[in-house]
Image (spheres, rainbow, N blue to C red):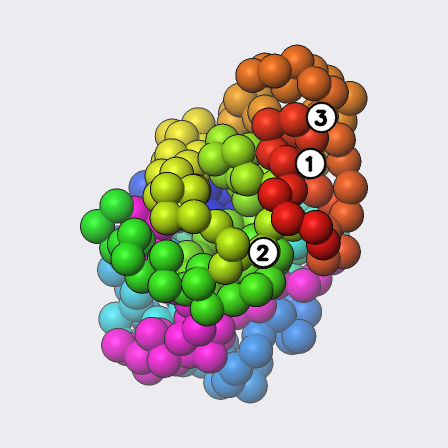
Amino acid sequence: MPELPEVETVRKGLSRLVVGKKIQKIQVLWPRIIEQPETAIFEASLVGEEILSIDRRGKFLIFRLSHYELISHLRMEGKYQFVEKNEPIDKHTHVIFFFEDGSQLRYHDVRKFGRMTLVEKGTSDAYKGIMKLGPEPLPDTFLLDGFRLGLQKSHKAIKPLLLDQKLVTGLGNIYVDEALWEAKIHPEQPADTLKPKEAELLRKAIIDVLSRAIEAGGTTIRSYLNALGESGNFQVALHVYGQTGQPCVRCHTPIVKTKVAQRGTHYCPNCQRLKISK
């Protein structure tokens, strides 16, 4: 599933490719991709709209249009492809944006899990999926005091707590594993048992891992490509995710894979010790 660095990389690529373009028509080939409004209204409403900018909130893309905001969630396999002229349409293309200059933006989704929602201009923050999100993982928005308070309020294991997007948004399976390794925290450590210094180190690790992943263009594990058709490069910098059996770069202990909250989880059993019994 694309995580925050991948979605941010897609946003940057799309901004270069389609901002300023006017929509001539929309073709929806798989109506279930459109969450709201009804498909016919969705298609009709977008005719003549200009893409003014593209923003991101957590893992959601937000297309700012002349009169609307289009919220796009890529989910597991969603991706956008920009084409300069008409080309054959493959079976996994589900939505096509036709622009007045003859170019197209195509939404592909092998598993058809992605969703698009069209809302009135200025209302995307009230969208149900966005309202629940915690702060962006940036130094000036992801504040230590609020993070510590959120940790103290939960006895939940730290990994699933970080995955639920409420304390900080944008973390998925890959980057939670990497941030916990960097902060030397076991993925099953109860959140309310973290000491103030550990919370500080974890916040710093989250910001660091995500910022480096964005700089590298995200992580390509299976099928992720950005809007320019390029793979991400952060996979070469992964310390634990996908490194089962490989020596930890800090202590040389073999990396272990287990399951935490039904998610494949990688950690170093020496650097990341569970400090209380389960």
> Is residue 121 placed above or below 145 in the rendered structure?
below
Where does residue 188 sit, x and y in percent of width and height? Answer: 65, 50
Horizontal side of residue 167 vs 50, given as left or right: right
Seen from the viewer's position, the closer of residues 146 and 176 is 146
* Residue at which label 2 appears: 190
Of badges 1 and 2, the one in the foreground is: 2
Crowd around label 3: few <14 · some 14–19 · many ≥20 (10 Å):
many
Asked if the residue at tag 2 contacts the one at tag 1, i.e. Cβ–Cβ closer than 8 Å, the answer is no
Crowd around label 1: few <14 · some 14–19 · many ≥20 (10 Å):
many
In space, the residues marked 1 and 2 are separated at their CA atoms by: 17 Å
What residue is drawn where x is 52% and y is 27%?
A: 234
SS category of the residue bearing label 3:
loop
Asked if the residue at tag 3 contacts the one at tag 2, i.e. Cβ–Cβ closer than 8 Å, the answer is no
For the residue marked with disc 1, what is the amino acid? His
SS category of the residue bearing label 1:
strand
Magenta highlight range: 111-138
Based on the picture, tell me whether residue 119 belongs to the magenta stretch. Answer: yes
Q: Is residue 55 visible?
A: no
* Residue at which label 3 appears: 255
Seen from the viewer's position, the closer of residues 35 and 137 is 137
Horizontal side of residue 243 vs 66, given as left or right: right
What residue is drawn where x is 67% and y is 63%?
A: 113
* Residue at which label 1 appears: 266
Q: For residue 224, what is the image quadrant?
A: top right
Based on the picture, tell me whether residue 82 belongs to the magenta stretch. Answer: no
Crowd around label 2: few <14 · some 14–19 · many ≥20 (10 Å):
many
